[in-house]
Amino acid sequence: MYCPSCGEKLKSGVKFCPKCGTPIPSSEEPTLDSPTENQQKTPQATLESPSIYDKYAVKTQEAMQTGGGTSSNSNKSLMFSVISLILAIIAFIVGGVGPIGISSYSYYYYVALIIVGITVTILNVLGLIFGIVAKSFSGKAERTEPNNSIRKVGSIFAIFGIIINVIALIVALIFLIIIIPFLIFY
C-alpha cells in the first residue's frame, strides 16, 4: 500500500504516513495499490497549513520512532513528583518525632522545637517546588504524548505532592508563628 499524497510505501495497518503525516484511509475505503507515475516523480504540495490532527499524528509517529513512546518529560514528571511526596513524608516524620527525650521544662526543648519547625518548613517548601516542577514537566509531556500512562501517574503524584506539601507548610508555619511563641512566653 502507498500513501495517496506522497507515494511513500506504507506498512500494513498504519493510520498516518511516516513521511508526510497524511491520514491513511482505512482498508474499507479504496486505496492505491501502487503509486502513480506523477506521485513517484513529484510530491504534492498544498498551500494550506497542516491541521492539528496532522501535527498530532506526526508527533505521535516521532515519539514512537524515538524509542518506546515515553519522553524524558514524562520520566522527569514522575521522578520529581515522587521526590515531592518523599519530602512530604520525611517532613511529617521529622515533625512527628520532634524533640523526643528532652524535658518540656528545659530551654533545649524550645530550641529543638524551633529547629524542628524550621526543618519541616524547609522540607515542605522543597517538596512544593518539586511538585510544581513535576507538574510543568507533565504539561510539556502532555503536548507530545497525551495518552502516556507515565505522564498521567506523574501528574497525579505531582498534584498530591503539591496539596500535601501546601497543607503541611501551612501547619508548620502556624506552629512556628503562633504555637512556639505561646509556649515560650506563657
Image (spheres, helix red, strand yellow):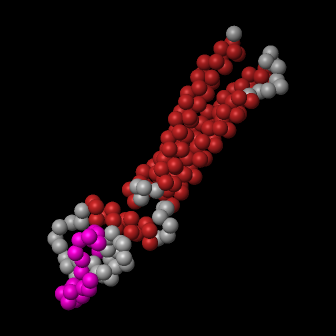
Q: Position of residue 167 (x, y in %)?
A: 55, 30
Q: Residue furthest top?
A: 186
The residue lying toward the viewer, choosing from 88 and 184, is 88
The residue lying toward the viewer, choosing from 92 and 27, is 27
Q: Measuring 48% from the left and 62% from the top, which residue is drawn there? A: 71
Most common secondary structure along the magenta stretch: loop
The residue lying toward the viewer, choosing from 109 and 43, is 43
Whether residue 126 can be seen here: no
Q: Residue furthest front?
A: 28
Q: Position of residue 78 (x, y in %)?
A: 54, 51
In the picture, measured across the screen, residue 93 lies left or right of residue 42, that is right
Q: Position of residue 111 (x, y in %)?
A: 74, 25
Compared with 7, 130 (above or below) is above
Classify the position of the N terminus by image quarter: bottom left
In the picture, measured across the screen, residue 135 lies left or right of residue 143, that is right
Q: Position of residue 34 (x, y in %)?
A: 26, 86
- Give residue 29's quadrant in the image: bottom left
Residue span colored magenta: 20-42
- Give residue 175's quadrant in the image: top right
In the picture, measured across the screen, residue 78 lies left or right of residue 35, that is right
Compared with 49, 158 (above or below) is above
Q: Measuring 59% from the left and 31% from the top, which residue is drawn there? A: 168
Q: Measuring 17% from the left and 73% from the top, which residue is drawn there? A: 46
Q: Is residue 168 magenta?
A: no
Whether residue 4 can be seen here: yes
Q: Count the marks: how many?
A: 0
Q: Is residue 35 magenta?
A: yes
In the picture, measured across the screen, residue 128 lies left or right of residue 114, that is left
